[in-house]
Amino acid sequence: MAEAFRSFVDMLRQQLVALFSQREEKIVIETQRLVRQLGPARVTIQDLAHDLKLSAGHLVASIAAQPAIRWRNISSASASR
């Protein structure tokens, strides 16, 4: 019984990791697109939230909950343009 529960918890953990990874990836891709379109100095949280169809508060909470979000990827993509 304990092994079945451990397996269930591990499966649930993997699904949550995949879900958060997809959300992170969507935020990164949309941010890169906006940076290319508007320039890094003009992109706002409101622009990003609007394009992701989220409230600015939910977007900020998502970012704060995932400090490992790949902002380095965004920075390097905008720096290389």
Image: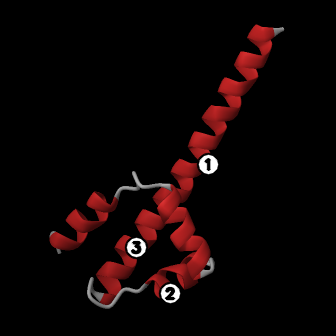
Q: Secondary structure at mark 2?
A: helix
Q: Amino acid at mark 2?
A: Gln
Please name the residue shown 59% across and 77% down the image. 57
Q: Earlier in the sequence, mark 1 or mark 2?
A: 1
Q: Circle 2: is it few (<14), some (14-19), or many (20+) Cα within 10 Å?
A: some
- The answer to whether residue 5 is visible is yes
Q: Which residue is mark 3?
A: 31
User: In the figure, is residue 22 to the left or right of 12?
Assistant: left
- CA–CA distance in space, label 2 to label 3: 12 Å
Please name the residue shown 75% across and 23% down the image. 8
Q: Earlier in the sequence, mark 3 or mark 1?
A: 1
- The answer to whether residue 26 is visible is no
Q: Which residue is mark 2?
A: 46
Q: Which residue is mark 1?
A: 19
Against 62, residue 41 (above or below) is below
Q: Circle 1: is it few (<14), some (14-19), or many (20+) Cα within 10 Å?
A: few
Report the front residue among 53 and 69.
69
Q: Earlier in the sequence, mark 2 or mark 3?
A: 3
Q: Amino acid at mark 1?
A: Leu
Report the front residue among 54 and 51.
54
Q: Where residue 74 sits: x, y (%)?
A: 30, 65
Against 72, residue 49 (above or below) is below
User: In the figure, is residue 41 to the left or right of 21?
Assistant: left
Against 64, residue 39 (above or below) is below
- CA–CA distance in space, label 1 to label 2: 23 Å
Please name the residue shown 55% across and 63% down the image. 62
Q: Secondary structure at mark 3?
A: helix
